[in-house]
Structures are given as structure tokens and as C-alpha cells.
Image: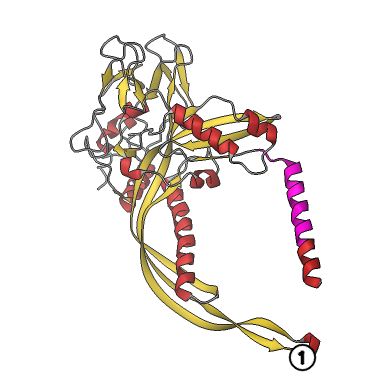
Amino acid sequence: MPPPLPSSPDDPPDAAQGLAEPPGVRGSTRGAGETMDDGKGRTFPCEGCGADLHFTVGTQHLKCPHCGFEKDLEFQPEAVVAEQDFEGMLERLQELRRKGVQDEQQTSEVRCSSCGGQVVFSGTLTSSECPYCASPIQRENIHTSDFRVPVDGVLPFLVDHERAAAELRTWVKSLWFAPNEFKQKGVTGKFQGVYQPYWTFDFETFTRYAGQRGDHYTVTVGSGKDERRETRTNWTRTEGSFHRFFDDVLCFASKGLPEWMTQALEPWPLDDLKPFNQQMLAGFLARTYDITIETGLDGARSRAEAALSQDIRGRIGGDEQRIDHQQTQYNAITYKHLLLPLWLLAYQYKGKLYQVAINGGTGEVQGERPYSAWKIFFAILAGVIAAGGIYLLTQR
């Protein structure tokens, strides 16, 4: 159930703390680490030497890069990654809008406690490092904000920097029609580990459909030298209905990457999700969503509709299928707001910028790449020559 709303539309934002979920329902110990700059930021100082702790992929612990001190992640005993009520969250957000409660500001400055420099967080960025001393710093309470959809779970990085680089080299060598120079030199650039926002949706669907089944048959037409066999199709009308449950339909909740790239990175090892914990973000970049939960559901429905169309074609059967009508009802909608890990890299080749993303849970690589116009030309030419040869042989 959604938490209670402010009692009055005149309540200031600080008075809306009743919107926060009970500790442990969605995440971890909120007080882990230390707040800074009047509560606007958070760091995780080492208990041994006072330096900043970083989350390490190999051990899945916080570790000090200076003295080697390690610390386990802290979770409330009752913290779980659970499905949330979609309709209840919509009601909560709509009520906040009616009361005039504003979202967090898009730009924030946090004073670094290590060197005193100002760290600017703009847009959806929530976790970064000080540009002067490289200390990891996070904006406080953004992912658990009372005025946004809180994060339910985090998939920690399972693929470290070295493996990501190896997967990238393998990907470059596997590219068809890539320039030889590009494949020999490979991709160079700086990796960035980023936790990106995702929505996942569960729903029960009930679909009614009507269509036509096409069954092929052959007939002999003409006579003498003109005699030949033709394939024709017999069409029969069909209709039906069926139920299907969809589990964890993913929707990328940021505008920073193209949809084809994020979908090609799937699947994700969601069985390894952990309850939200800011400690896992230490030393990595992180972003909050700029695609709303309503828009996210629209995207999930589009993916479901495509899958249901395939189901309908399978149920119609035959050699060909036509779908004349498809209507789906969505019930029992739940969601999760997740942060999933990506290694991102931007590189240049002959003056053009390309972007590559690596799934931080599986190592899957997807990205933009250059093509060799000469290789494509000779491939097309070889295809034309082969087709011409086959045609001549058949004429003889």
C-alpha cells in the first residue's frame, strides 16, 4: 500500500516525510555512511583510515583503495525486492500533484567534505565523484525521495572492468563488414560504470482475436510447354481468446541510450537483485529516471502486444496468418523500480562518435560501429555474380 500523504496542500516539502516507506520495506539502512553539506550528499568513509570506500565487483563488498579495509553491505533484516502496486503508486503521484508538491530540483551542488570543492549534479545524475579529489559522492535521498517513485532493487556489478574490456575486444573482432583498420586497432576510450534506471512490470493479460488461416496447396495450370505448378492459398476465418501472464517486462527509464541497444542487452540476471542500498553505488555513476512510470508501462505493453501477436499466429496455425482483430485487457499490474549496471564507452573513429554499452551483469556487448563501404560493395557484387551464375545454369 502507498504511504500516507501530507495532511494539507500547504505543508512544505520537508513536512512530507510521512511519504517515506517504513525502513526495510524497499531498501537498506538509510543511515549507512555519513551525510555532508547539510544533508544534501552522502559519502562512505573508511573506518580504518578515513578515506572513501568503493564498491568492489569481485568481492561484492565496500573496500578502501588505500588501506584495504573491507566492509559488508548493510541491509535491514526485513529488506526485500518486492512487486509494488501500480495503481496505488499512480494515485499517490496524482495526489502529490494535486497538493502542489514539487519534484526535486534538477540541478544541485554538494560541497565535497574531503577537499571542499563543489560537485555539480545536473539532470538525472545522482552518484558521481569529486572532479578535484575523485572522492565518490552521492546526492542524498533522490532514489528514496518522498516525491518520486522509490528504487526497489539494485543489481550490483557482476562483470568487472577487466572482463568488460575483454568482452569488448571479442565484440570488435566479431563484427562483419567492419573496416580492417578498426578491427586491428580495436576500441580505445574510458569505461564508465553507470547504474541506469529501469522499470519492470508484471501483468495478467486476456486477449481476444480474430483472423484468417492460410493453407497452401498446389495446382497444375497450362498445357504443353506452358504447363506449370502454382502455389495457392485457401483462407479460412478463425477466432479465439486466451490468458497469458507476463513477468518482469523491462523498460529502460532513461533517455540516454537508444531503445534497440538496451533491448539487445537483455536478458538480465534479475535473480541476483539486492534491496536498494546506496553503498552499492559508491565509486560508480548513477542516474534516476526521466521516463515516467506511466510511459514505462506504455512501453511494456508495446512489447507484450508484439509477443501476443506471435502467440495469435501460433494459435491460428497454417502456412500463413492474418490478424484482423487483437484486443487485450491488462489486469493485476505491478512494477519494480530498479537500477541495473552498465559499462558505457564512447569512442571516435575517423572523426565520428560511437557509443557502446556492456551489460554489467552478463557481459553482453551492444553498440554502434563503423562499416566498410568496400566490403559491403564486394559482398553485394559477389551475390549478384552468384545469382547470375545460378540463373545461367538453370537456363541451360
Q: Nearer the viewer, residue 55 or 146?
A: 55
Q: Left or right: 163 with respect to 7?
A: right
- Viewport quadrant of the C terminus: bottom right
Residue 133 rendering spot, x and y as whole percentages? 44, 11
The kind of secondary structure the magenta stretch mainly shows is helix
**Which structural element holds mark 1?**
loop
In which quarter of the view is residue 228 placed?
A: bottom right
Amino acid type at circle 1 is Ser
- 163 inside magenta stretch: no
**Residue under the image location 42 percent in, 77 percent down:** 240
Q: Which of 104 and 149 is in front in this view?
A: 149
Q: Is residue 151 in view?
A: no
- Quick check: 265 above or below 112? below
- Quick check: 107 above or below 154? above
Residues in magenta, as a range: 370-387
- Quick check: 11 above or below 1? above
Residue 94 rendering spot, x and y as whole percentages? 37, 47
In which quarter of the view is residue 283 placed?
A: top left
Q: Residues within 10 Å of mark 1 (few under 14, many from 20)?
A: few
**Residue under the image location 32 percent in, 11 percent down:** 67
Residue 167 rendering spot, x and y as whole percentages? 50, 35
Name the residue furthest bottom: 223
In which quarter of the view is residue 214 placed?
A: bottom right
Q: Left or right: 299 with respect to 333?
A: right
Q: Is residue 84 in view?
A: yes
Residue 346 rendering spot, x and y as whole percentages? 58, 30
- 372 inside magenta stretch: yes
Q: Left or right: 164 with respect to 227?
A: left
Query: Which residue is label 1 attached to?
Result: 223
Name the residue furthest left: 77
